[in-house]
Image (cartoon, rainbow, N blue to C red):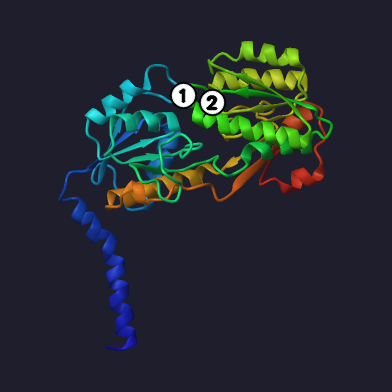
Amino acid sequence: MQRREFITLFGGTAATWPFAARAQNTNRAPRRIAFLPDLYPATLEAWRAEMRVLGWIEGQDFVIMQSGKQLGSRGPLDEAAQRVVANKPDLIFTRTTAYVLALQRATGSIPIVTLTSGYPVEAGVADSLAKPGRNVTGNAIYTETGVWGKMLQLLREAKPDIKRVGILWTYVIPAFPKEEIEPCFAELNSAARSLNLELHIVEVANSDQPQAALAEIDEWKPGGLLLTSFFSEKARAVVMQFAVGKGLPTIVDVDVWTRIAAPLYPLLFYGPLNRELMQNAVASVDKILRGSSPGDLPIQRPRRFELIVNLETAKAIGLDLPPVLVARADRVIE
């Protein structure tokens, strides 16, 4: 066979393979993919887009089974997990370790992919990141990333004379297991000692109503705020109105605040790229639907973290940010 003929044959095979795979999928019932909790509309569209990239056609290759339960909504997680499992989906897509734990209590066989998890090994949902060994895989966004210490360091860089940092902590039981909360607090306290910072952590039990937590923080007179992302959109605006009114620099760990108009977006954001997390998770969905076991698929850590600096917020609180910090930002809001 001549070289040109070989290339033509190989290229023709590669070009037709996706269509052959799709034709094969049409001979079987679409895969049933359940969501617990349901994804926000924009997040669900991002999920669908990544599935299309990998050749999966909704309605033909898979169907979505919504649970009717939103992230952060109240009610027992175990009951919701049991309802989802009773429908016998082929795969369950979830987020946060508490949901993974509830689903694992309901099933040890249905594959589970989690968009986000903090410390899955410490929480007991996986044997290791490299080889989970059970029915779950996905992303671990905090394990061995040093993100909490880095956030405190960035606040210090933004305001070098800062001495006290208040923390509004929304990652609370039952939505987040104590096995994940404790490593976060340990890292924060260790970093605070290294940076000679005082911390005051206020756990926010109701993420819709931050007023009591803000009152407690205000009495402590912090020089800056570290925020976690699990606030409702209305509560985010309340928190940032407080911070801007007090002239406090703020940093948040997950970029879900961008829908709030400046200057009510936090001064700094430092966290994983949402698109990378989605790509990792959907790649696991793809592999499982093609026959891989979730226990053999490594749980992924973020490859890089993004720093966003909001100059509009800096102006609103009267803070001149060091040029070197602004220059390091992946994105600057002006």
Question: x, y (%) of residue 315?
Answer: 78, 30
Q: Do the residues bearing badges 2 and 1 touch, measured as CB atoms within 8 Å?
A: yes
Residue at the image position 72 percent from the left and 48 percent from the top: 328
Q: Is residue 319 above or below residue 147?
A: above
Q: Secondary structure at mark 1?
A: loop
Q: Nearer the viewer, residue 272 or 6?
A: 272
**Which quadrant would residue 261 be assigned to in this image?**
top right
Q: Nearer the viewer, residue 174 or 239?
A: 174
Please indicate whether residue 33 sits to the left or right of residue 272 in the image.
left
Question: x, y (%) of residue 79?
Answer: 31, 21
Residue at the image position 81 percent from the left and 41 percent from the top: 322
Q: CA distance from mark 2 to mark 1?
A: 7 Å
Q: Is residue 264 above or below residue 214?
A: below
Residue at the image position 29 percent from the left and 83 percent from the top: 5
Question: x, y (%) of residue 275?
Answer: 50, 45
Q: Quadrant of the N terminus?
A: bottom left
**Which quadrant would residue 137 be assigned to in this image?**
top left
Outermost residue to the bottom:
2
Q: Nearer the viewer, residue 92 or 14?
A: 92
Q: Secondary structure at mark 2?
A: loop
Residue 171: assigned label = 2
Please, what is the three-letter code of the amino acid marked with disc 1?
Ala
Residue 114: assigned label = none
* Residue receiving disc 1: 175
Task: Give the class, few, some or many, for how many residues have Cα within 10 Å of label 1's Cα (few <14, many ≥20).
Answer: many
Residue 117 visible in rendering: yes
